[in-house]
Image: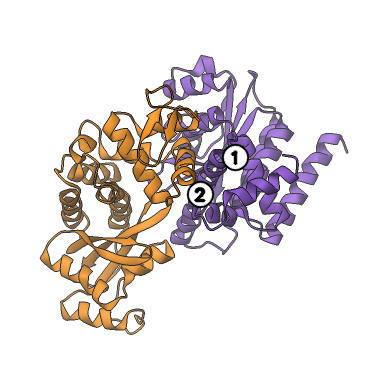
Amino acid sequence: MDNQELREALGDAITGAPTPLDAADRLCTACVQLLDVDGASISYMGDGTMQGTFGSSGHLSRTLDELQFTYGQGPCMDAVTQRRPVLAPHLDGHVEDRWPALTEALLGRGIHAIFALPVAVASTPIGALDLYRRSSGPLDDSAMTGGVYAARLAALPLLDLMNADTDWQSASEGRGSWEQLESLERVEVYQATGMIIAALDVSPADALIRLRAHAITRGFSASDVAYQILNRRLVLDRDDWHEVGDDDGRGT
Amino acid sequence: MSKREDDIVAAFVSMSGSLARGLDVNELLTQLAADCARLIDVSAVGLLLADPRGALHVVAASSERVADLEAFQAQRAQGPCHTCYLDGQPVNVPDLAAAAARWPDFAAVAAKAGVVSVHAVPMRLRDATIGALNLFGATTGPLNEADLRLAQALADVATVALIQDRAASDTHIVNEQLQKALDSRVVLEQAKGVLAFSGDLDMPDAFAALRYYARDHNIKLTELASALVQRAVPAAVVLGHARTRGA
């Protein structure tokens, strides 16, 4: 399977899922099928602390993810705080001394390698995708590439979970996941996100959620909404965004 | 030496000084894009880097005009800059209208920005291409040999600036550094948005305010941008400083 096929297979896995949690589970299951690993889980981190397991390929993976929460240490936390992949291909080797308690618990469950890839929204890390393997040794290039793809895709259901108001059904209809993701990675979207940060005094990740939710509920693209904001055609009230010239619109 | 040669030497001297002082990579690349646009007499210059998926992102530009940025980023997966990145070879489009059929989506966005000619030179690191330096012209016609060489030299300096931290023997580390540069561009755009909203400014003025404050307080541009979007530094402080500078 080449990179393009891998990318499409991962994108297909989350397209059409009925809820964000289902989408996350499906993405994890696809990782196990496509990336030569035995388990996968996605954890959500808020304010630098692990908030919980958000998706998994199965019961064991969920348990493994929760172990990191229990011990308060692990590659998933490190991946988020260091904003880079944290790879532990040899949990059974004596050079591995980063998370002693967790390492022992993982080995006790037959896991010999763990790879954590950060999940970021608007460059703010909000979680991590963990890949588990029973055999030790590094991920091969194809699995690593697939893992990076999957970690990027994982941002979409996470965004929706954080913003419970989003209509997941309409969010996943019509447009592919990659397209949705790419529409969030544009200069105008970043600039508009900054304007929302200033207008509503919220974090960058929250600002992007607001922008995306507004786009989804009105049937616009993220880029459309970004231009409305940049051109001051959309008034960013705390509870109600309205276009300039709306009945209750007072303009800027 | 001619005036132009003087300018070129001055640009390289200032760049190597910045490199040695460990200046913020984003500031340095922005400076480089501005120097390049001035020395080669094109309307806008952008530096585009590839992410691990091979999609191109604008990491620095000589122009803060939204139309220009839009035209640079329209080449995420299609356009002369993307072709240059894929082939690792310079791409010269002296008359974009005549080549519109090859990149229809890009040609439409570029036309809106007033771009009529496009040139791209690769940013190469040994045998890999990590991105491209993209030049937009407001007049048709090819670049002469000297300008092309100059553009390639500037692209090489940009590559060195990006990978300066280590002897980058490891693709993993190279990818991390590129990702860092891309992330800091995101934060920079967000910070411009914060200032634009708070001070009711357009994006070029917002960027100017950001740079004034960073320079006068000897803070790295990316650090200041990050503090603004995390709301650790109030926008009013940065805006107030810009006003005292008469900006």
Apparent side of residue A128 relative to residue B107 in the rendered image (left or right) = left
Chain A colour is: orange
> In the orientation shown, which residue stands out farthest toward the left?
A59
- Chain bearing mark 1: B
Secondary structure type for disc 2: helix
Residue tagged 2? B187
Quick check: can you spot residue A91? Answer: no
Note whether A155 is above or below A106 in the view shown: above
Counting from the top left corner in percent of width and height, residue B10 is at 80, 45
Of labels 1 and 2, earlier in sequence is: 2
- At 15% from the left edge and 59% from the top edge, which residue is drawn? A57
Q: Which chain is purple?
A: B
- At 67% from the left edge and 51% from the top edge, which residue is drawn? B213
Counting from the top left corner in percent of width and height, residue A206 is at 37, 49
Note whether A200 is above or below B81 in the view shown: below
Secondary structure type for disc 1: helix
For residue A52, the mark is none
Quick check: can you spot residue B182? Answer: yes
State how far apart marks 1 and 2 are (Cα). Answer: 18 Å
Residue tagged 1? B199
- Chain bearing mark 2: B
Q: Residues within 10 Å of mark 2 (few under 14, many from 20)?
A: many
- At 74% from the left edge and 45% from the top edge, which residue is drawn? B244
